[in-house]
Amino acid sequence: MVAEWGIPFNRPSLVGNELSYLERAARGLPHLDGRSYTDAASRLLRDATGAQDVLLTTSCTAALEMSALLLDIRPGDAVVVPSFTFVTTALAFARAGASIRFADVDPGTLCIDPDSVAPLLDESVRAIVPVHYGGAPAPMEALARLAAPYGIPLVADNAHGTFSRCQGRPICAAGRFSALSFHSTKNFTCGEGGALVVNDPADVDRARVVHEKGTNRRAFLSGDVDRYSWIDTGSSFALAEMLAAHLLGQLEARDRVLARRQQLVARYERLLTPFAEQLGFRVRSRIEGCDTADHLFYVLLDEGERRDHALAGLAAVGIRAASHYVPLHDSVGAATFVDRRVGTPACPVTTSVSARILRLPLFYELADAEVDRVVEELVKLLSR
Ligand SMILES: *Cc1c(COP(=O)(O)O)cnc(C)c1O
């Protein structure tokens, strides 16, 4: 075990007014303009995404769970998710009773592959949940065309790409809902947090009730009703005001944070690309017309064994790189929740990529010299 990493994989930073906002919130004081920090942060996100509403939640997982409640997912329903993703993309729907159908990903973008989704669709599918992998857009238009004949809504897991834009549009605007993450490993953080982006005006009122423990407390606070009571299903989904204060400080500094991440990724690309062919790896591909949030940087090795060798070799010199995701369709949980009505899932691209992907350190305070060092050590390891 390495006690302290010379270059960690990720480290959260203070990037703006987090501490002064947090102190006010801890004393029960609102933001200087008199609004709550929750209001200020959700308004900032609403303006950036053009959404009908943005509700801050305790996590991205909680936002996905909210969308399962809002879509009335129940036992017998099927939900399509990529196998190459984090557990809760599937679990949020499985725990509402859905059976999970696993689709494969595109080997170029590592986002869900519409050709793999098409054969999974029928009348029992109640949602498709693409992931905007690394902040790059999932193929929402192609998925919407496949989903339209069955009236299936799209719920985007956008844990990685809060401020990503493509063809001039925020990627959060696509799909009926988007779920954001502010976990400490993500681009903007308050430790644990998230948000549900609501794009359909018809969902706004019910989403506010589900968010507030099934009550019309929100209507009460805005003076629309004179007391609040139990109305519908829901849970304690709302983010604490202190965490919203920290989050607002982070979100206000978004231009600086995103620009720095872009610089770091460009540096990795520039330094690694000349070695790619000779040393047998592929550098993460950029997507035309997109200004993505650059949540991660990876290379794909030609063989799993060389990836494991590189991970161990970097760790030995104090550099923490990472792999991910263990294919969900092969997991223990899948045995319980997989939908056997469509046969045994096969996701060969997911299985292959999961064994070969190598993610390199990437965070706001990573120094140029540290990127150079990671590249130098990696090239040395792969040249042997
Ligand atoms: C981080 C992550 C989540 C979970 O986010 P939380 O805020 O920790 O619940 C879900 N999906 C993806 C793709 C993630 O990377």
Image: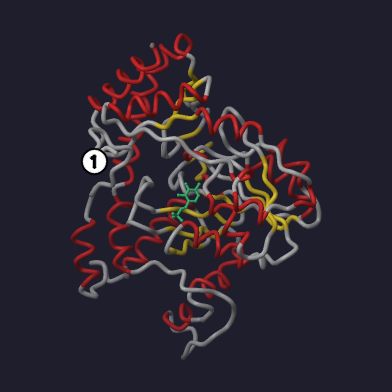
Image coordinates for residue 217, horizontal then vertical, percent? 46, 81
- Residue 236 or 20: which is nearer the viewer? 236
Q: Which of 336 and 280 lies nearest the eye of the viewer?
A: 336
* Quadrant where the image shows the N terminus: top left
Give percent across and percent down for residue 375. Answer: 33, 21
Q: Which residue is mark 1?
A: 3
Of helix, strand and loop, which one carries label 1?
loop
**Image side of residue 342 versus residue 165, left or right:** right
Colouring scheme, one of rainbow, by chain, secondary structure, one colour: secondary structure
Extreme-top residue of the structure = 278
Which residue does the image show at 51% across and 81% down from the upper left?
216
In the image, residue 205 above or below residue 363: below
Percent position (x, y) of residue 179? 51, 55
Q: Residues within 10 Å of mark 1 (few under 14, many from 20)?
A: few
Does residue 244 appear to the left or right of 289 in the view shown? left
- Rendering quarter of residue 102: top right
The x, y position of residue 92, in whole percent, is 57, 59
Q: Give the image quarter of residue 309.
A: top left
Instruction: Please name whichever residue, 1 or 368, is drawn nearer the observer in this view of the structure.
Output: 1
